[in-house]
Image (tube, helix red, strand yellow):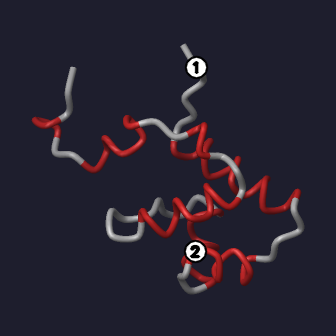
Amino acid sequence: MRYRPTRSELVQLVNQARLDRHVSIRSAARIAGVPPATVQGWLAGRHFPTPALRPKFLRLVEAFELTYLLHPALWLDDLPPSRIPD
């Protein structure tokens, strides 16, 4: 079984990849196509991307070559409890 990071771990890994590549918050925001405050909130762990902004967050994940860390269960918190599969 491969490693499946939690949401907070994924955000920390994305932020570390950003820092390792010397990419500023503003540059990361340009990559994602969102305001810098939004990226800063994501990467500080204050909030996880809403379903509407998920594709923009995934741009960062792709830009930092971290797509191998994604898994479907990452988004299960968005489902009502009765819809979460066993």
Q: Which mark is residue 32?
A: 2
N-terminal of the pair, mark 1 or mark 2, is 1
Percent of width and height locating residue 24: 80, 76
Residue 9 or 62: which is nearer the viewer? Answer: 62
In this picture, is 74 found above or below 38? above
Callout 1 secondary element: loop
Instruction: Give the quarter of the figure containing the N terminus.
Output: top right
Q: Residue at x 62, y 63 (%)?
A: 60
User: Looking at the image, how many numbered discs can be counted on the residues?
Assistant: 2
Q: Residues within 10 Å of mark 2 (few under 14, many from 20)?
A: many
- The amino acid type of the residue labelled 1 equals Arg
Spatial distance from mark 1 to mark 2, Cα to Cα?
27 Å
Q: Where 85 falls versus 46 (above or below)?
A: above
SS class of the residue under badge 2? helix
Vertical order, 3 against 42 (above or below)? above
User: x, y percentage for residue 80?
Assistant: 16, 45
- In the picture, the quarter occupied by the C terminus is top left
Q: Categorize mark 1 by other alpha carbons within 10 Å: few (<14), some (14-19), many (20+).
A: few
Of the pair 72 and 49, the residue shown nearer to us: 72
Q: For the point 52% across and 59% down, which residue is it?
A: 58
Specify the amino acid type for callout 2.
Ala
Q: Is residue 63 left or right of residue 51?
A: right
Percent of width and height locating residue 74: 42, 41
The residue to which callout 1 is attached is 2
Q: Is 47 in front, or is 54?
A: 54
User: Residue 37 is drawn in which quadrant?
Assistant: bottom right
Left or right side of 3 for 64: right
Q: Seen in the image, is 27 located left or right of residue 2?
A: right
Residue sitting at 58 percent across and 74 percent down? 32
Residue 16: x %, y % from top left = 79, 53
Occupied quadrant, residue 72: top left
The answer to whether 39 is drawn above or below residue 9 in the figure is below
